[in-house]
Image (cartoon, rainbow, N blue to C red):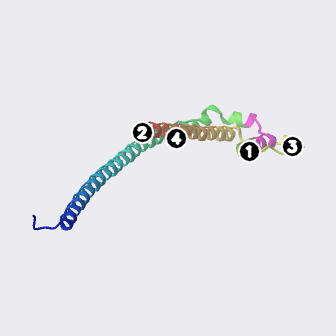
Amino acid sequence: MTLIPWPYRLLALALLAAALIGFGWIKGAGHVQAQWDAAIQQQTLQAATMRQRQAEATVKVVTEYVDRVRVVREKGDTIIKEVPVYVPVQADVACTINRGFVRLHDAAAAGDLPEPAGDADAAAARIALSAVARTVASNYQTCHENAEQLRALQAWVNEMKAIAKH
C-alpha cells in the first residue's frame, strides 16, 4: 500500500497536467507573439523603404521639372526680348490692331465666348503689333511651362506606380 491516497494522486496528476498545459500555452503564445512582432517589424521596414523611395523619386522628378521650366522660361524670355527685332517700329505703324481682335484675344485667353461683334470693334485699339507679339509669346511660354508641369506630374505618377509594384 502507498502512503498517498488515490484522490490526492489524481489531484497531483491533474495539477501536473494543468501546469504542463499552461506552460505549453504560454510558450505557444510567446512564439505567436514573436512571429507577430517580426511581421509588424517587417511591414514597418517595408513602409519606411517605400517612403524613402517615394521621396527620392519625388526629388528627382521635381529637380528635372525645375530644370526644364528654367530652360522654357529662358527661351521664352529670349523670344520676348527679340520681338523688336522681328516686329520693327515700321510694322507697328503699318499694322493696326482693332478692338475686335483685342476682345477676341482676351475672351480666348479667359476661356469665354466673346460678345457679338459690333461697329465699335472695327476701330483701332491703339495697341502696337509688337505688344501683340509679346503677349502671344508670353502666352506660349506659359503654355510650355504648363506642359512641362503636366509631364512632371505624369512622370511622378509613373514613378509612384513603379515603386508600389515592388
Give amino acid for label 3.
Pro
Residue identifier under label 2: 163
Which residue extends farthest top? 86
Nearest the camera: 123 or 71? 71
Which disc is residue 116 wearing?
A: 3
Q: Earlier in the sequence, mark 3 or mark 4?
A: 3
- Nearer to us of marks 4 and 2 is 2
Residue identifier under label 4: 153
Q: How crowded is mark 2: few (under 14 residues within 10 Å), some or many (20 or more)?
A: some
Q: Residue at x 81, y 41 (%)?
A: 100
Q: Residues within 10 Å of mark 4 (few under 14, many from 20)?
A: some
Q: Earlier in the sequence, mark 1 or mark 2?
A: 1
User: Does dot 4 land on a helix, a strand or a loop?
Assistant: helix
Q: In which quarter of the image is residue 145?
A: top right
Q: Position of 24 compared to 102: left or right?
A: left
Tell me how far mark 3 sits from mark 1, CA to CA: 14 Å
Q: In which quarter of the image is residue 24?
A: bottom left
Magenta residue check for 98: yes
Q: Position of residue 68 (x, y in %)?
A: 48, 37
- State which region is magenta: 93-104
Total number of numbered discs in the rendering = 4
- Nearer to us of marks 3 and 4 is 4
Q: Where is residue 124 in the image (x, y as percent from the top left)?
A: 81, 42
User: Does dot 2 land on a helix, a strand or a loop?
Assistant: helix
Which disc is residue 106 wearing?
A: 1
Q: Position of 157 compared to 39: left or right?
A: right
Q: Earlier in the sequence, mark 3 or mark 1?
A: 1
